[in-house]
Image (spheres, rainbow, N blue to C red):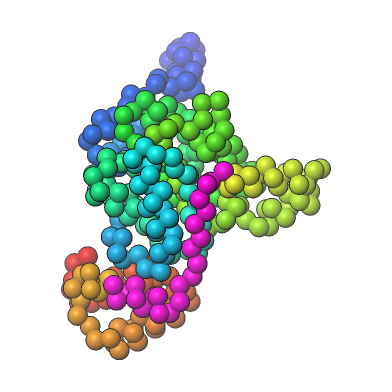
Amino acid sequence: MGKLERIAKAIERLSPAPVSAPDFNSSEAFAWHVEPDRLEPVDKVNRVDMSLLVGIDRARDTLIGNTRQFAKGWPANNALLWGARGMGKSSLVKAVHAAVRAEGEDLKIVEMNREDLGSVGRLLKILRGADARFVLFCDDLSFSHDDHHYKSLKAVLDGGIEGRPDNVVFYATSNRRHLMPRDMIENERSTAISPSEAVEEKVSLSDRFGLWLGFHPCSQDEYLKIVKGYCQEYGIDIDTETLRTEAIEWQATRGARSGRVAWQYFIDLAGRRGVSV
């Protein structure tokens, strides 16, 4: 391979050809990938029914209301779902998408990985030109001290000369309310020349979400209610005392109670009972 050909290929990698939009009528969900840029349709979305999400009624009602507004073309906020692990943050986003579609709205969901946030501008150019309306979803969003992807994300939420496309709303989940560890915030305060400005630049990203929906660890009663709901949904007949004893023992071995732990116990129960899930 000649030197000129190698240079041409290097330039092509740095400036890839524009990505053509897929047929958005082919699916209700798409996954964004890079290298090369592409939107791939998702045949079947991994989701649970809204009725199985217990103990998050306020967040559920707020998010479905916001999503319904957006799907109808009315003003709607970007949303940050933050808080305890395994309490249904990402499950709620996917369940709300399904619920709004069930109401007759042609709403799409596009998932992108946190590592690909640097490409979000290229993705928005594709979505901006489409007739459909999109929930752009990023799961487990957080940033480390040397991560500059948050600057790319600001263009989605509010900034940038073009701003967020009218047909896109951004939903993210995170274990952290301000999208970064507390020790990182304290380190910025202690080492920066202008501590308040250094912290403000990072924390201001979470401020750009119009909705902050908090998720907190569930009580034992809520945990047992979640497990019972799964049993009813999938037709597993088990007496209440046995279910209670086994479920509590399961969560004790995990050292935590959450919707995820409830589901993991239920999977074990379903397997022992020979029930397909």
Q: Is residue 43 magenta?
A: no
The residue closer to the viewer here, 224 or 101, is 101
Residue plotted at (41% across, 53% down): 63
Q: Please indicate whether residue 141 sits to the left or right of residue 230 in the image.
A: right
One can see residue 253 in this view: no
Residue plotted at (43% across, 22% down): 16
The residue closer to the viewer here, 146 or 192, is 192
* Percent of width and height locating residue 25: 23, 34
Above or below for 248 versus 7: below
Residue plotted at (63% across, 44% down): 204
The residue closer to the viewer here, 59 or 196, is 59
Q: Quadrant of residue 246?
A: bottom left
* Percent of width and height locating residue 32: 38, 37
Residue that extends furthest to the front in the rendered view of this protein: 74
Q: Please indicate whether residue 54 sits to the left or right of residue 158 in the image.
A: left
Q: Is residue 210 magenta?
A: yes
Residue plotted at (39% across, 39% down): 74
* Percent of width and height locating residue 54: 37, 68
Query: Magenta span covers which residues?
Result: 208-229
Q: Quadrant of residue 276?
A: bottom left
* Percent of width and height locating residue 43: 23, 44
